[in-house]
Amino acid sequence: MRWAAAVLIAVSIGVAAPVSASVDEAEVSLVTFEDLPGWDVDDHEAAMVAFLHTCELLDDPQWRPVCALGFGFDGPPKSFFELFFRPVLIEDGKAPLFTAYFEPEIMGSERRTSRFDIPVYRLPPEIASGQQAYTRRQIEEEGALAGRGLEIAWVEDPVELQFLQIQGSGRIRLRDGSTIRLGFGGSNGHRYRSLGDELVRRGVYNQHQVSAEVIKNWVRRNPAQGRNLLSHNTSYVFFTEREHLPPDAGPVGAMNRAITAQRTLAVDPAYTPLGAPVWIEKRGENPFSRLMVAQDTGSRIKGAQRADIFWGTGDTAGREAGRIKDTGRMIVLLPIQRAYALLPEE
C-alpha cells in the first residue's frame, strides 16, 4: 500500500466496516442501476474478479451471504451485482474529487555501488511505526541509520526514492532484470509536507504547473536547492520486502491483498466500507464510468465523494495517474439489507 494509505484500518481486515457516525450524518439516497451511465457496457467480469479477491475478508452478517453467492454464481457477473446489491449515493457536502496513484519501479542494486549508493531502509527495531524519530535530513544527510544492516537495496536517485515513499510501495529493478517488491514497512512519525506546495510557496512555479515530473526535473537541475527541497518533507517511509508477491500482481493494499490496476480504489472507510463495489463516474479529461472495488485507504483520502484510483505499475502508469484530478460521482454498491438500513427514517 502506498504511503498515503499506510495505516491499516483494523476493522477492514476480517470484518466489514460498521455503519459509522460519518455515514449517519451524511445525505444518503438510493439510485437505480438505470441511473448509472455506462453500466450496461462495463466489464463486470473484471469487477467481479477484483471483488471476490477480497470478499472472503468481509466477516459481517450482511456481507457473508453475498460473498458466498458470489463464489458460486454461474450467471453473468452483471446479474450478480444487480440481484444482490443496491446502488447508494452518499454525500457529505464536499465537492467530489478523484485522483490516481501508481506503483513506481526504479533501478537499483542489492549491493552498494558507485552508481547505486542511496539506501532503501527497513524500519529500525527501536522505533514503532508512526513513532516520531529521525527526520529525513538526519537519515539521508547525516547518516543516522548507516552501517546498521537495515538496507534492503540501494538506488541512484533520491528524488525517485522519495516519490516511491510517497506511493508507499514499489519495485526495484535489478540489473539482471529481476525485481525486489517493496511494501510499506513503517514511518518516522513526522508529518508529510508536499514538495509541490513548497515550490509554489517559494515562487518557483504556480500551482497548475506542478506535477511529479516537474518536481523531479527541477531537483535534478538544481542539486543544492534540490537536496534542501527533499529535506523539507521531514516524513520518511521505511519498507518491507514482499518476497512472495507474484511479479504480475499489484502491490498490497489496506486489506492485505494485492490490488488491481484500474479496478481498485482507495477510499475513506468512514463512508465507504472496504471491500465494497463502487461505481465511479470520472469527468474531466478522458472521462470514464467503471465498477471498481474499495480495497485501499489513504491518509489524505477523506470524504464521501473522495477516491484515489490505482492506475498500475511503472513510468507510464505514473505519468497517466499524475494527470488525474477530476470531479464526478461515486456510488457504493451495498447488500440490499445494508443499503435500506442506511436510508433516513421518514
Image: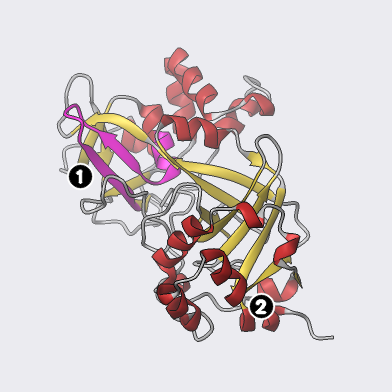
Numbered circle sitting on residue 339 = 2
> Does residue 115 appear left or right of residue 260 in this picture?
left
Residue matched to label 1: 150
> Does residue 196 appear left or right of residue 74 in this picture?
right
Say if residue 298 shows up in the picture: no
Q: Which of the two marks, 1 or 2, is nearer to us in this view?
A: 2
Numbered circle sitting on residue 110 = none
The residue that appears at 53% across and 55% down in the rendered structure is: 266
Near mark 2 (Cα within 10 A), the count class, few <14, some 14-19 or many ≥20, is some
- Rounded to the nearest whole Å, what is the CA distance between mark 1 and mark 2? 48 Å
Task: Please give the range of residues in magenta.
Answer: 162-185
The residue furthest front is 75
* Of residues 278 and 122, the one drawn nearer to the viewer in this rendering: 278
> Residue 133: x and y, percent?
37, 50
> Residue 132: x and y, percent?
40, 53
The residue that appears at 52% across and 29% down in the rendered structure is: 212
The residue furthest top is 221
Q: Earlier in the sequence, mark 1 or mark 2?
A: 1
The answer to whether residue 297 is above or below residue 285 is below
User: Which quadrant does the C terminus fall into?
Assistant: bottom right
